[in-house]
Amino acid sequence: MTVVDDIQTNQLSTRLIFYPLILLATGLWLLYRWQQQTRIYKLGNKLPGPIALPVFGNALLALGKKPEELVRLALSYVEVYGTVIRGWVGSKLVVFLTDPDDVEVILNSQVHIDKASEYRFFQPWLGEGLLISSGEKWRSHRKIIAPTFHINILKSFVDTFNQNSLSVVNRMKSEMGKVFDVHDYMSGVTVDILLETAMGITKETQDASGFDYAMAVMKMCDIIHQRHYKFWLRFDAIFKFTSFFEKQKKLLGIIHGLTNKVIKNKKEKYIHNKAKGLATATVVEEKTTDKDMSGLANAKTLADTVFKGYRDDLDFNDENDVGEKKRLAFLDLMIEAAQSGAHKITDHEIKEEVDTIMFEGHDTTAAGSSFVLCLLGIHHDIQTRVYDELYSIFGDSDRPCTFEDTLQMKYLERVIFESLRMYPPVPIIARKLNRDVKISTNNYLLPAGSTVVVGTYQIHRNPKYYKNPNVFDPDNFLPENTSNRHYYSYIPFSAGPRSCVGRKYALLKLKVLLSTILRNYKMESDVTEDQFVLQADIILKRTDGFRVQIAPRQRVPSTAA
Ligand code: HEM
């Protein structure tokens, strides 16, 4: 036997062992997947839901429907099937939950924190930023980012909130007497505020790209939404050959263009200042005084009753927070952490987080503030009460709003909460289950591998928790009405470990922005709420536009008028 024969015999025997092994492993894997899928089918079909077709499941229900029709369809199913509804997207089990007890089991868990696979459509845009990342990466980044929204940092943003609010009031003057879409203005001012506060980019270094950015975000959300409900677009291989893909490429060019520029400027400034021995970032150095603490205690009254059951990490033990502390705003901290090596965070990861904060912090508050202004345009009696409260704080003066003023805006706060109840900017949240979960409704077992969708919009309109759920009534948030309500019956910011990190930022900004607008204008609306055409394209919006009219505000309280 030659050496060549020897090698050939060896190769033959290796193949004889190797191929059957591969075959066996593939067979075992397929068997395991089949068993798993059979189990998912078995458990899924115990849940109530519409009849499913072979192969497609319920996916064809969305075929040919407009986004607003889909919202109506989803709502009608809750009427028919109740608070737990199953659907099949092909072979994938999707369970829609609207009972606060069931929702608590999911949101309050440290285990079920992974986002559903549908969030992957955000990936080309947000990468593995805080919204979609999971595991150790999410945990460590959340630990760095959450404290950058501490109340003491937020207090230092009030001047910027004021300047930008006044600037949008001036821009809106040109719309006096016309019907216009207030969302365009809210979107623009929100991007400007985010750039100045979280990103620390001063007005002088900004340009018109903020507006282009806001428009590009809106169009990107629309593409992602289409990928959610047109099931063929879910497959990357098909999506790449559609016009949406080219559009997405262009939009991401605009969006990433702005975030890259923001990071580059900030980093250059950091390096320049460090070389010159100057301060590398805007540091909030605060000695919390007793007066502040009593202010904080007051500030907590409503928000604390409403959110105290959330069990998230946003309260930062304020009661222990007396003393001198140095705090950095979001991007300053990220750059400092990366450059000084204090935290392991790469330039690419900073970019992902900047994109995430810019998206999450912008579109949500733009929709939230637009809904409040539309609702006040419809409900004049409520608008009058808001203005009377503002008059009692500011009189007829033009002075800017302070942090302490925002603590007095109790009624405006209730109006904001009620608007977020009826029109939550994030109307659904979705999680992927990595383990089985038993929920309280009928002790149903939701199998690992399924997707859970939390129906925030529907939870907020449950008559069990809100007497007249379809009536806009800020008194739903009077302390006596909130104190005994199920915490998970009000979740505009989600809840638990993956709740919104920007909750306090959003509420403070909304108070400054809305109070400034309402001190200057009276809102009017030519439509009523039942004429709103809602579309849940990631963020809840009105497809008919956030149409309002404005009139100059007579600075007198209603009693004098
Ligand atoms: C009215 C305004 C806002 C609303 C209603 C809102 C709502 C939410 C909701 C429901 C989630 C959970 C999403 C999910 O699980 O899929 C979330 C997450 C998040 N929000 Fe907000 N948000 C608002 C403003 C903001 C602002 C101003 C910022 C930052 C400046 C922000 C940053 C984030 C981030 C980073 C996350 C991901 C947190 C994590 O997964 O750990 N949000 N928000």
Image: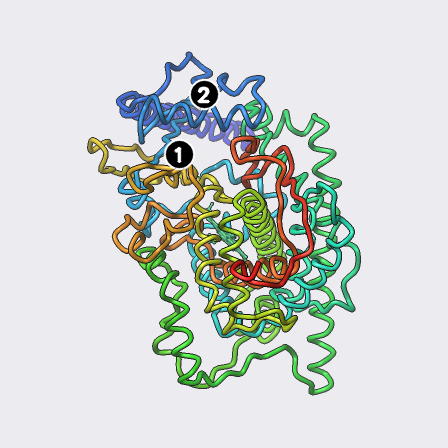
Instruction: Pick the quarter of the image with the C terminus.
Output: bottom right
Question: Relative to residue 77, is residue 270 drawn left or right?
Answer: right
Q: Residue 32: horizontal and vertical position, in percent?
A: 33, 27
Residue at image point 58% right, 30% down = 227
Instruction: From the viewer's side, name the closer residue of 461 and 560.
Output: 560
Q: Residue 220: horizontal and vertical position, in percent?
A: 65, 40
Q: Which residue is mark 1?
A: 451
Is there any visible trace of residue 130 in the rendered image?
A: no
Q: Residue furthest left?
A: 443
Is there any visible trace of residue 222 in the rendered image?
A: yes
* Three-letter code, disc 2: Gly
* Three-letter code, disc 1: Thr
Instruction: From the viewer's side, name the closer residue of 28 and 342.
Output: 342
Instruction: From the viewer's side, name the closer residue of 11 and 154.
Output: 154
Q: Which residue is mark 2?
A: 90
What is the total number of numbered labels drawn onto the structure image?
2
Q: Which mark is residue 428?
A: none
